[in-house]
Image (cartoon, grey):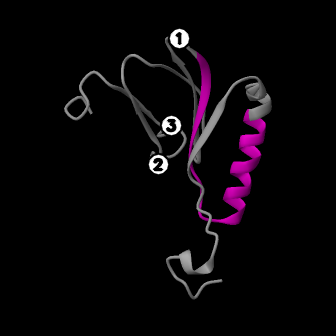
Amino acid sequence: MALICPSWSYVSNHHSDPDGRIILIWKPHLNITISHQSRQSLTCRVDYPSVPPFYFTAVYAGNTVEERTELWVELLDLHATLNLGSYPWLVRGDFNEIRHPSEHSIPSIS
């Protein structure tokens, strides 16, 4: 990592998933505090000079309905546990959801 992004910091969710499906990389002027990590998400508090703190959750959802349901329950729990109603909270990532069957990698599956 030091060769690609000298002096930058990074964290992954390898402690929660052996594949480490989520990696966050940031420049040194940000202060990142990891609040929660799981197999499907990584949540951190972001502090930046002269900007109010906010929370960021990176998501890489599972492929099954059951896994995605677990993710939504986890996000609701995080909202309550971290009091995220009192802070801006940005949630981004791959939720493994499609709007139309034609978007599926195997379109014949409905």
Against 106, is 25 above or below? above
Q: Crowding near pointer 1: few (<14 within 10 Å), some, many (20+)?
A: few
Q: Give me the C-alpha separation between circle 2 and circle 3.
A: 11 Å
Q: Give me the C-alpha separation between circle 2 and circle 1.
A: 32 Å
Tell me the residue at 46%/48% (across/down): 21
Q: Nearer the viewer, mark 2 or mark 3?
A: 2
Left or right: 38 in relation to 81: left
Secondary structure of the residue carrying tag 2 is loop
Q: Which residues are magenta?
A: 52-78
Tell me the residue at 66%/32% (across/down): 89
- Mark 1 or mark 3, which has the lower sequence index? 3
Q: Give me the C-alpha separation between circle 1 and circle 3.
A: 32 Å
Q: What residue would you read off at disc 2?
A: 21
The x, y position of residue 86, in whole percent, is 76, 23
Magenta stretch holds residue 58: yes
**Three-letter code for the amino acid on which mark 3 is drawn:** His
Tell me the residue at 45%/45% (across/down): 20
Q: What residue would you read off at disc 1?
A: 50
Q: Crowding near pointer 2: few (<14 within 10 Å), some, many (20+)?
A: some
| Residue 27 seen in render | yes
- Quarter in which the N terminus is drawn: top left
Q: What residue would you read off at disc 3?
A: 15
- Mark 2 or mark 3, which has the lower sequence index? 3
Tell me the residue at 47%/47% (across/down): 18
**Three-letter code for the amino acid on which mark 1 is drawn:** Ser
